Image (spheres, helix red, strand yellow):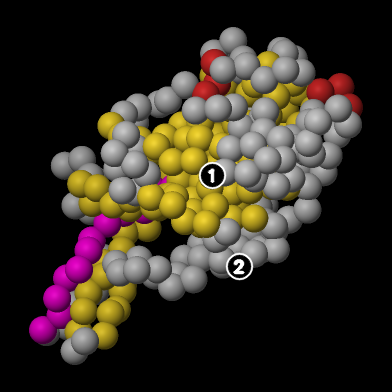
Amino acid sequence: MKSRVYPAFLFFCGLLAAPFVSAHSPFLIPVSFIPAHDNWVTLDAGFAEVFFQPDVAFDKGNFQLLTPAGQWQAPGRYEQFKTRSLVEHQLTEKGTYRFTTGSRLGAVFRFYELNGARKATRDPKEVLPKGAKLLDHYQSVTLAETYVSNDKPTATALKAYDKGLEIVAINHPNDLYAGDTFKLRVLLDGKRLAAKDVSLFTAQDEKPLATLPTNAQGEVEFKALAKGVYLLHVRHTAPAPKEAEAPNYGYVYTLTFAVNAPL
């Protein structure tokens, strides 16, 4: 199989249903899903409104990789620039590696309604106007991930964290070919989330190709995918731990994957 380098695709978060507003979303993408010379892989990470064109580097993360043998490691090289973060690593084992930004605790947001208009503030010292109705108060928690296989795909790296918001692949994201169906499960702290919308974005699209709800088992499938790069996006608000800076966490999770040309 020859190495493929995938073009960037456009993505605009848009105006989201209350209490969310237009915002940057995280991403993590390899330059190629097939390791390059001497099995090196390079990945790009950031926050963007247009994927994969980062506006802000993914800072305050904990970039790691899970090897095919199930061992967590720091990447061979990590560099943070103003608008992007770069990771390089040599894949010395055969099988699938999981690359992750690590969960990032971000800004604290308050959303409120005043005189019929929805407003937001991220200044904890700001006093809400008289008559304002608080809609939500949360701290952002962002996580972006992807998988790269050296030789044949293996399953160890697909294991769930059972912590925070996550997408767990049911069939392997590095073993998808045009016409295949990608099946996945959405979990929050290990519990399946039913009726949770998952959005699928494709190259050059500002709007999702599809947004589907999970079923009663927290599962969803995207059928008959065409060749190309895709990004899955899911968000969820849930109560935060007592020691958190806000009463809720606003989770955002993204997973980048590729679909190969038909065999």
**Magenta-colored stretch includes residue 73:** no
- What residue occupies the far left of the structure in this picture? 131
Q: Read off the residue under disc 1.
A: 222
Q: Read off the residue under disc 2.
A: 206
Question: What residue lies at 86% left-to-right and 27% top-to-bottom?
Answer: 1
The quarter of the rendered structure image containing the C terminus is: top right
The answer to whether 73 appears left or right of 192 in the picture is right
Mark 2: amino acid: Glu
- What whole-number distance in Å separates the C-alpha atoms at marks 1 and 2? 18 Å
Query: Along the line of sight, which residue is nearer the eye, 48 or 8?
Result: 8
Please give the range of residues in magenta: 131-144
The answer to whether 250 appears left or right of 8 in the picture is left
Mark 1: amino acid: Phe
Dot 1 alpha-carbon crowd within 10 angstroms: few under 14, some 14 to 19, many 20 or more: some
> Is 59 above or below relative to 217?
below
Say the numbered circle drawn on residue 132.
Answer: none
Q: Secondary structure at mark 2?
A: loop
Dot 2 alpha-carbon crowd within 10 angstroms: few under 14, some 14 to 19, many 20 or more: some
- What residue occupies the far top of the structure in this picture? 69
Question: What residue lies at 40% left-to-right and 26% top-to-bottom?
Answer: 161
The answer to whether 97 appears left or right of 170 in the picture is right
The location of residue 229, given as percent across then percent down, is: 69, 47
Q: Contact, CB < 8 Å: mark 1 with mark 2?
A: no
- What residue occupies the far bottom of the structure in this picture? 115
Q: Quadrant of residue 240?
A: top left
Nearest to N terminus: mark 1 or mark 2: 2
Q: Is residue 125 visible?
A: no
The location of residue 68, given as percent across then percent down, is: 62, 15
Question: What residue lies at 67% left-to-right and 28% top-to-bottom?
Answer: 175
Question: What residue lies at 83% left-to-right and 39% top-to-bottom?
Answer: 4
Q: Quadrant of residue 201?
A: bottom right
Q: Secondary structure at mark 1?
A: strand
